[in-house]
Each structure stands twice: as structure tokens, then as C-alpha cells.
Amino acid sequence: MRHQKNRGKLSRTSAQRKALMMNLSRQVLDHERIKTTEAKAKAVKPEVEKLITLARRGDLHARRQALAALGQDKYVVYKLFEEIAPRYAERPGGYLRILKLGPRKSDSSEMVFLELV
């Protein structure tokens, strides 16, 4: 059953949405903290948490799946598997935190920090 499996479309086509998720995931793993809108943060949070859980496995298949999800960015995948995943070896989940910052001045979009715990 697909109960509660729907996600926001973020006013983009599926290809644009896939590229956005890939880029946001890459940025979160690379910088460990990004400033973005609340809707984008809520959309990308499950994707990044799945990648960290995948990296905790640490095998070759998991590494190839992460490369596919992050767009063949070997540096970010290396950092994910060698630096980030060992940090969360004992943690059962909840690797990211969303901190609200308030509305953006130009269009009043709710801005947040998305960061690794």
C-alpha cells in the first residue's frame, strides 16, 4: 500500500526535482550544513538519511548505489563512507536536524538550516 508516500512536487518537473534532490543531497553531505527553504529541506531530509544508512553498510553495492544517487561525485561518496557514516555507527536514525530561521525578506519563504546532527 502506498499510504503517505506522496511528496511535494516543489513546482518542478520530475527531472528538475531529481536534479534538485541530487544537488541538495550533495551539498548537505559536503558542507554538513546548508541554508534552504523549509519545503526543500523537508523533501531532501529522507533522501540524505537513506544515504547515510546505506553508507553505514559500507559494502561495494552500497557505494555504487550512493554514487548513482549523488551523480557520480566520488569525493562526496568518499566523505560519506569514510567520515560521516562512522560518526553515526551507533545511532539508529535521525541524522539531520532542521533549524528554522524565519521568513526570507524578498518573498517571505520560510528559511531553515539543514544540518547533520
Image (tube, rainbow, N blue to C red):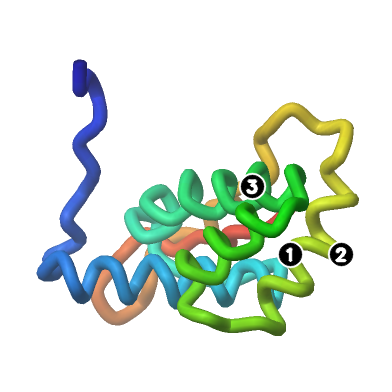
At label 3, which amino acid type do we have? Leu
Q: Is residue 117 visible?
A: no
The residue at 50%/50% (across/down) is 45
Dot 3: what SS? Answer: helix
Residue assigned mark 2: 83
Measured from the top left, where is residue 19 in percent x and y?
32, 75
Residue assigned mark 1: 80
Dot 2 surroundings within 10 Å: few (below 14), some, or many (20 or more)?
Answer: few
Q: Earlier in the sequence, mark 2 or mark 3?
A: 3
Measured from the top left, where is residue 80 in percent x and y?
73, 64
Dot 1: what SS? Answer: helix
The residue at 37%/51% (across/down) is 43
Q: Earlier in the sequence, mark 3 or mark 1?
A: 3
Q: Is residue 10 visible?
A: yes
Quarter assignment of residue 60: bottom right
Residue assigned mark 3: 54
Do the CB atoms of the residues marked 1 and 2 lie less than 8 Å apart? yes
Measured from the top left, where is residue 77 in percent x and y?
68, 71
- The span from disc 2 to disc 3 (Cα, nearest Å) is 14 Å
- The span from disc 1 to disc 2 (Cα, nearest Å) is 6 Å
Is 5 above or below relative to 20? above
Front residue of 115 and 85: 85
